[in-house]
Image (cartoon, rainbow, N blue to C red):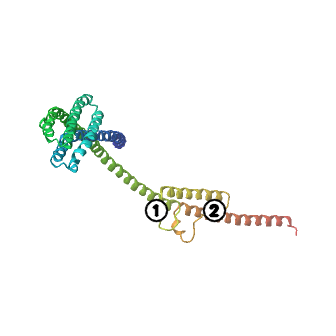
Amino acid sequence: MAWIKSLREKLIILNMLVIMCLIVLATVFTWYNKKRIVDTTAKKQQAELVKMRLGNIFREYLRGMDLGLRGYALTKNKQVLSPYENALKDNARNLKELDSLFKIQRLDTVLARFENIKTGIESYVETTRQMKTAVERDSLQTFVRILNQDKGYDLWVLFSPFNDSITKYEDRQIAQAQTDYESALNWNILILVILAVLGVPSIIYVAYKINRERKERNMLLTELDENNRKYLFSPGDEGDHTTLSFQESISQSIDNFRKAVNFIKEISNKNFEVRWAGIDQTNIHANESTLAGELIKMRNQMKLAKQEDDQRYWTNDGLAQFSQLVRQNQSD
């Protein structure tokens, strides 16, 4: 059975090493996947922003210019012209943002095509300025003539294929970013599942072993304290074994052995008045069978034997002196 226990311990050690490696890998993968998630999120946001800004060219800015000019032509009220002026500013800013986004996405070919789109937009903007000038000069005929040229349609013919191709490309970028994002999350979940599958049983087993060793240690301390009281020295009180630490229990045993050694040394030096520290009337009966009690009995017996020897020596010495005195004084 010893080899089974050894095998279990080795498997636990191996399992803990695997868990440590998995924790390190999980940390590395978490950092890597976090970077992937940040990158894919940024790419997705960039792609969605490109689609929105491209759509705004016609949906917001060119439409705003057209509506503003038509209202201005009908009312001659410059306040009605504000959508046109705002659209001009926002359109210029929007084109710059698109340039930056294409550069971030490293779409060099798209940038070259986009220059043609910007040229077409500038041409349309110039046409709108001519229409605005015609209204200011109160030349409605010129305004209508330019309006009938339908420059917006020509721009849409130029813009629509570009917009479709870019929209499809950005949709693919969004889909790929979403796939990468989900893949990163799935890897994190997989690593966490592996850690849970291997880690939870190991942690439970380690907790079981620690609890079992704690109980065995408490039983050992209890047995050690009981044997200390039974065979070495009993202070007389019941004692609380659970409050004793392993070090305290060992220290008590060592202290009792030290007392025993010193007690025996004193007896060897014929000091029969030596006392065992801690022995009194309250615990003398509890130590009748302990090492301390037996040593005290031995001391008492040796003390009594010495007293008898001293008495015998005194008697024999007295008789010898009396006999010598009688011999020396036979004639008297």
Mark closer to the chain start, 2 or 1: 1
Location of the C terminus by quadrant is bottom right
Q: Is residue 155 left or right of residue 293?
A: left
Q: Secondary structure at mark 2?
A: helix
Q: Is residue 53 left or right of residue 230?
A: left
Frontmost residue, 223 versus 179: 179
**Mark 2 Cα shell of 10 Å, populated few (<14), some (14-19), many (≥20):** some
Q: Quadrant of residue 259?
A: bottom right
Q: Residue furthest bottom?
A: 281
The mark total stands at 2
Q: Is residue 204 above or below residue 234?
A: above
Give me the C-alpha separation between circle 2 and circle 1: 39 Å
From the image, state whether disc 2 or disc 1 is nearer to you: 1
Q: Amino acid at mark 2?
A: Met
Residue 187 appears in view:
no
Residue at label 1?
243
Q: Amino acid at mark 1?
A: Thr
Q: Is residue 186 above or below residue 119?
A: below
Frontmost residue, 233 versus 7: 7
Residue at label 2?
302
**Mark 1 Cα shell of 10 Å, populated few (<14), some (14-19), many (≥20):** few
Residue 18 at x, y percent in the picture: 34, 40
Residue 306 appears in view:
yes
Frontmost residue, 326 versus 131: 131
Q: Is residue 295 left or right of residue 170?
A: right
Residue 191 at x, y percent in the picture: 29, 42
Q: Quadrant of residue 133?
A: top left
Q: Residue furthest right?
A: 332
